[in-house]
Image (spheres, rainbow, N blue to C red):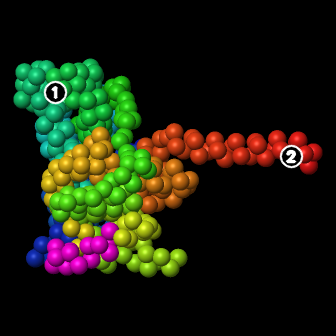
Amino acid sequence: MKINQSTSILFWLFKAKTSADGKTPIYCRITIDGMRSEFSTGKKIETSNWKPKPGEAKGFGEEAVSINRELNKIKAGLQRVFDRLDATNERVTADLVKNTYIGVNPNRKTMDELFTEFNNNLLEKVKANEPTHDIKTWKGFKTTRNKMLGFLKHKYKVRDKVLSEIRHSIGEDFNHYLIATDNLKSNTAYKYIRNAIQVLNYAVRRGYISLNPLKDVKCFYKNPKRERLTWPEIMQMYEKQISLKRLEETRDIYLFGCFTGYSYMDLYNLTNDNVVTWIDGNKWLIKDRTKGDHNKSNVPLMEIPLSIIEKYKNHPYCVANNKLLPVNSNQRFNGYLKEVAIICGIDKDLTTHTARHTFATTVLLENDCPIESTSEMLGHNSIRTTQIYAKTTDVKISNNMKAVKARISSKLEMIKTGS
């Protein structure tokens, strides 16, 4: 039944829930502006006695008449609910109509209940291995919930708060709390506010609230200064003789990251199977990055990483565990890197992130590798992400200007010679 151009009600059989007696439950689907919401009518029928179009029981027997009478009551009830909500709400959603009809009051949904529902749904997607969802994302939203509840306790002296009682000033107040009370940097606060906006957008779609109270919050992400090694520092580290085996191995693995751009987990998971003679006849690392199959990261192997692979091919740990490199736990690796930096005389905070940034800038972009190729090797879905790494450096400017000067000198020489 059509209520208006963008709204419809449909009755259908949920065949996956057919019971042992051969009867299938009848469900009602409400669609408004392309968004659906469904609920059980409480009625069952044999599939052979059902007409999918227009969605009703066949014939004029007692069962068919009784079922169709009940379905008509549901249609009429939903019509009344929609008309009432349409007169008092800026936006009516399918979930709002359904919840109002079946007696669920969405206006009593609390912030904690909202975050719990959102995070549970997200965790289900993670467990289903959806490529756009990972456990790190879920943990971020879980932490955002804790930050929000901490804010409510600090600001309102309550453990939780009903969504309908949330005022639009919450955005500025939440941002202030994260920075002034929780002592977070502005970029970290931005991350949690961005997550909260996403959760409250979900609440709007589900009909729990009509407008997102965080939609007008003003906060901005500031690109941080990202540490990287210069080419002399890379060579300084590469040529340094290190007597301690654990630090020598850490240095080599870090340098491997500087020439491949791989993250810690990528380095840890590498096996000999990832080294392949590729289409150009040279050795490449061929693999999908840990975030999912859509983030392919294939990298040609240069001389230094090839020498590191050769160095550790018979390492006991690598042989026993089918690993390409003897990578320690993340905590030990980062701890050892601090010692490596001191030994090599490098006054920078070395992490796999700085290695990745070094690969993008010092190794690739400063040597005129196109940003499109750089993006592919970093495993980015968008060049916009790569541009975070692609800050213009003095070396890049110098190289470009040398080329410009050479062209200008050539033109001047042509003028002088008259050619």
Tag 1–tag 2 contact (CB < 8 Å): no
Asked if residue 278 lies left or right of residue 351, the reply is: right
What's under tag 1, amino acid-wise? Asp
Q: Is residue 171 visible?
A: yes
Name the quadrant containing residue 299.
bottom left
Q: Amino acid at mark 2?
A: Met
**Residue 131 as seen in the image, left or right of residue 336:** right
Q: Position of residue 252 (x, y in %)?
A: 29, 61
Residue underneath mark 2: 414
**Residue 83 drawn at (x, y percent):** 32, 35
Q: Earlier in the sequence, mark 1 or mark 2?
A: 1
Q: Secondary structure at mark 1?
A: loop
Give the Cα separation between the discs numbered 1 and 2: 66 Å
Q: Which residues are magenta?
A: 308-320
Count every numbered label the image shows and give the total: 2
Q: Magenta segment: does it hold 313?
A: yes
Answer with left or right where residue 2 lies relative to residue 265: right
Helix, strand or loop status at disc 2 = helix
The answer to which image quadrant residue 214 occupies is top left
Q: Is residue 226 magenta?
A: no
Marking on residue 171: none
- The residue sitting at 59% across, 46% down in the picture is 399
Mark 1 highlights which residue? 182
Q: Residues within 10 Å of mark 2 (few under 14, many from 20)?
A: few
**221 up-or-down from 168: above or below:** below
Location of residue 215 with respect to 319 vertically, above or below: above
Residue under the image location 61 percent in, 45 percent down: 400
Residue at 69%, 43% in the rendered image: 404
Give left or right: position of 387 versus 29.
Answer: right
Residue 123 in percent (x, y) is at 19, 54
Q: Residue at x 6, y 29 (%)?
A: 159
Where does residue 244 sit, x and y in percent of width and height? 17, 59
